[in-house]
Amino acid sequence: MDPTPNQQRQLENLGLTPTKPDQIPSKINLIPLFSISGITLLSLGGLILLKTKNSSSITPPSNFPSQESLPSPTQVPKSIQHYLLASQQYFTQALDSQASKSDNQTIINYLNQSIIAASDAIKTSPSDYRGYEQRGRIYLSLLDTQPQLIAAAISDYQQAQNLNQNSPDLTRQLASLYAKKGDLQNTLAYLSATVSLEPTKAQNFYDLARIQQQAGFLPDALATYNRLLPLISDSAQKLQVETEKKTLEKIVAQNDFTSPSTPTSAPQPSIITEGNLLQASMISSLIIAAPEISQNISLKNQTDSNSLSGTGTIPSGQKQVVIQNSQLTPSSQVYLTVLTGGKNQSLELLSKSLDSFSAGFLSPLSEDVTFKWWIVNP
């Protein structure tokens, strides 16, 4: 039986029938039962439906969730991979904008979006180191022109390393950051940790031994050289390290070193979930650099003029060079060893004062001579 026009309208109001009558399945049995005070009962294939006269939809039960409380597709939680990818994409856009010489406000906007996405990654998965590392890399890329961000970079890398303690890349990056800050103790601590995690990479030992010597930790530097030598394949480099090692052995044997050993403990990280967004005041000097792992770690503000070890060069045709140094005292001992040039010649300490010493030969040589020097203060 085909439904009457009135019945078809009722079904359409219920959303139970197509708009075209010829599309109604022939097997649907629609039987009006009765009507009381504006309420119509219909039977559709054995199912009793209740429809009020003045309503266009079925009223849900009072305990049924409202439409506003139901999650929409856009409210589905996103994974950390989503935020990490978004952060990297925004960072790449910032680099591209810098390369195309876009205005700095556009670059800052992209960088801030990258920081926000990395912060969302941290909030989504606070026990995953990758969110902290990603945000730390963004800050690291800006340090050349925004050095005030070093604290934020260190905080993020510390937390990343705390969550992933077997990563030599993280400990080495922390050593580099602390070296930029001029923090000797933490630079040595994280370099020592890097050597322990990656004991076959010569560069880690080179950097550690050099900074140990600059700081006056000569017995520790000697131990580092002993571990470094088996890793060197280049004959010239190996000869240079062996030469320095022999001098260090002599210095250590002749002096009583009471200075503390290389620090090995690092500070605990502070957990920061909200990122430091960039301000408009940074526009005039903002430059993004590639946030790669430092290839050569050098302690900020530590030079030949204020460290306890360094190198010098006597140019061809000259017989001496003067090294200015604030660490010299009346009782300081200065040790010298030739690294390159000056074969069969004896390099001597020619003079010493409270703020400098001179090293050289009795007569000029026809080649450049590089040498290593150490100051030992009793």
Image (spheres, grey):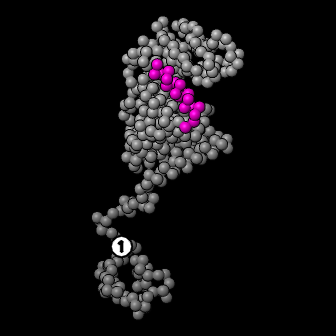
Q: Which x, y percent locates residue 85?
A: 51, 51
Q: Which x, y percent locates residue 320?
A: 64, 13
The N terminus lies in quadrant: bottom left
Q: Residue at x 43, y 91 (%)?
A: 26
Residue 11 highlighted magenta (yes or no): no
Q: Nearer the viewer, residue 146 or 127?
A: 127
The answer to whether residue 157 is above or below residue 345 is below
Give the residues drawn in magenta, as a range.
Answer: 233-250
Which of the 4 image quadrants contains residue 336?
Answer: top right
On the question of residue 257 being in view, the answer is yes
Q: Residue at x 60, y 35 (%)?
A: 286
Q: Nearer the viewer, residue 7 or 66?
A: 66
On the question of residue 278 being in view, the answer is no
Q: Which x, y percent locates residue 72?
A: 42, 61
Residue picked out by circle 1: 58
Q: Nearer the viewer, residue 287 or 197?
A: 197
Q: Residue at x 55, y 42 (%)?
A: 111
The C terminus lies in quadrant: top left
Residue 246 highlighted magenta (yes or no): yes
Instruction: Give the amino acid type for the residue marked by disc 1 in the picture.
Output: Ile
User: Badge 1: how crowded within 10 Å, few (<14), some, or many (20+)?
Assistant: few
Q: Nearer the viewer, residue 307 or 273?
A: 307
Instruction: Determine whether, in the image, residue 349 is placed left or right of residue 1.
Output: right
The answer to whether residue 261 is above or below residue 161 is above
The answer to whether residue 125 is above or below residue 193 is below
Q: Residue at x 64, y 10 (%)?
A: 362
Label 1 element class = loop
Q: Which x, y percent locates residue 24?
A: 45, 86
Instruction: Determine whether, in the image, residue 366 is placed left or right of residue 247.
Output: right
* Main secondary structure of the magenta stretch: helix
Which of the 4 image quadrants contains residue 75?
Answer: bottom left
